[in-house]
């Protein structure tokens, strides 16, 4: 599973110092490459000893997607408009 190399969405409950600490995230809803694991909460969560990874990707049209699994070496997540999006998404 590829790592979330950088997460620039500081308000996410799983983000601490630009690092994702969710054990696995899900990307996409078939139309937008958003981080579906993005969650705002007053208490930070996740496993701070672990780096988040991409568990599933619903963006079948992404160059890095094989069988709904991300094959990129790592991804970057950032806030775009009203959500946390995968900036590594590349249309085929």
Image (cartoon, grey):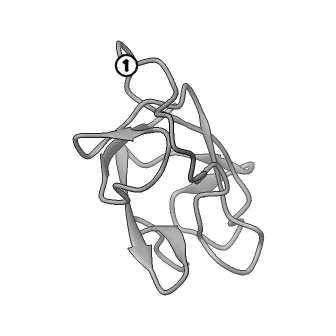
**In the image shown, does 58 or 82 lie closer to the viewer?**
82
Farthest front residue in view: 42
Query: Is residue 21 depicted above or below 60 in this figure?
Result: above
Residue of label 1: 48
Query: Is residue 15 depicted above or below 29 in this figure?
Result: above
List x then y, in percent, for residue 36.
67, 56
Could you tell whether 84 is left or right of 9 in the image? right
- Image quadrant in which you'd find residue 79: bottom left
Task: Kindly identify the residue that appears in the image at 50 percent across and 35 percent down.
Answer: 43
Task: Kindly identify the residue that appears in the image at 73 percent across and 80 percent down.
Answer: 31
Task: Kindly identify the residue that appears in the image at 55 percent across and 25 percent down.
Answer: 23
List x then y, in percent, for residue 42.
51, 43
Quadrant for the C terminus, please. bottom right
- Image quadrant in which you'd find residue 60: bottom right
Query: Is residue 84 depicted above or below 5 in this figure?
Result: below
Question: Which element is circle 1 on?
Answer: loop
Query: Is residue 61 depicted above or below 43 in this figure?
Result: below
**In the image shown, does 84 or 92 lie closer to the viewer?**
84
List x then y, in percent, for residue 52.
45, 32
Farthest left residue in view: 17
Q: Residues within 10 Å of mark 1 (few under 14, many from 20)?
A: some
């Amino acid at each position: 599973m590829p790592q979330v190399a950088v997460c620039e969405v500081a308000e996410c409950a799983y983000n601490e110092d630009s690092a994702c600490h969710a054990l696995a995230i899900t990307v996409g809803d078939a139309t937008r490459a958003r981080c579906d694991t993005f969650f705002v909460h007053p208490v930070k969560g996740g496993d701070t000893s672990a780096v988040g990874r991409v568990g599933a990707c619903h963006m079948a049209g992404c160059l890095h997607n094989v069988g709904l699994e991300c094959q990129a070496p790592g991804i970057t997540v950032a806030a775009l408009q009203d959500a946390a999006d995968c900036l590594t998404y590349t249309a085929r």
